[in-house]
């Protein structure tokens, strides 16, 4: 199938939302993780092919402080999940990720400017 079965928008801006819909496969789900009160225009034709949009934002204001304290205390080790890349390397790395199929060489790309 053309596109991705699941897309996570962690920015939540209009541009990232539209990009997410553009790369979403038929019957795919766009998950908006960055839920906020910014209005976003949606071309409803992009939802054709049984595409869906949902959110995943289940936190309370105090959760950030708690999560940061757990990270600082070493309860979670996330550094190994992060792969830092230069902005110039983004096209190449995304092509690598796309061609890797189910064997992804990276979990979370952190783009350094």
Image (cartoon, helix red, strand yellow):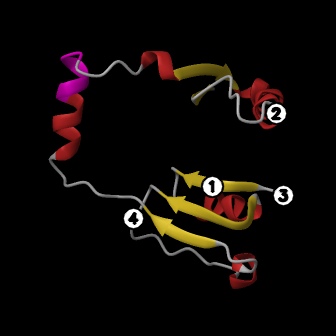
Q: Residue at x 60, y 73 (%)?
A: 52
Q: Residue at x 23, y 30 (%)?
A: 68
Q: Residue 91: horizontal and vertical position, in percent? A: 82, 33
Task: Indicate which disc, 1 or 2, sits on the residue closer to the N terminus.
Answer: 1
Image mark for residue 6: 1
The residue mark sitting in front, 1 or 2, is: 1
- Name the residue that disc number 2 marks: 91
Task: Indicate which disc, 4 or 3, sits on the residue closer to the N terminus.
Answer: 3
CA separation in Å, label 1 and label 3? 12 Å
The residue mark sitting in front, 2 or 3, is: 3
Q: Residue 93: horizontal and vertical position, in percent? A: 77, 27
The residue mark sitting in front, 1 or 4, is: 1
Task: Indicate which disc, 1 or 3, sits on the residue closer to the N terminus.
Answer: 3
Q: Which stretch appears magenta? A: 69-74
- Name the residue that disc number 4 marks: 36
CA separation in Å, label 2 and label 3? 21 Å
Q: Is residue 62 left or right of residue 53?
A: left
- Name the residue that disc number 3 marks: 1
Toward the viewer: 103 or 85?
103
CA separation in Å, label 1 and label 2? 20 Å
Give SS at disc 1. Answer: strand
The residue mark sitting in front, 4 or 3, is: 3
Give SS at disc 2. Answer: helix
Image mark for residue 107: none
Give SS at disc 3. Answer: loop
The residue mark sitting in front, 1 or 3, is: 3
CA separation in Å, label 4 and label 3? 31 Å
Give SS at disc 4. Answer: loop
On-image quarter of the C terminus: top right
């Amino acid at each position: 199938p053309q596109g991705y079965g699941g897309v996570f928008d962690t920015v939540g801006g209009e541009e990232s939302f539209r990009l997410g819909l553009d790369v979403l496969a038929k019957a795919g789900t766009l998950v908006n993780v960055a839920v906020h009160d910014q209005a976003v225009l949606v071309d409803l034709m992009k939802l054709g092919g049984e595409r869906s949009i949902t959110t995943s934002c289940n936190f309370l204001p105090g959760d950030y402080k708690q999560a940061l304290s757990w990270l600082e205390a070493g309860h979670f080790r996330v550094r190994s999940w992060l792969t830092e890349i230069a902005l110039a390397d983004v096209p190449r790395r995304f092509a690598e990720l796309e061609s890797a199929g189910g064997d992804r060489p990276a979990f979370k790309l952190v783009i350094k400017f």
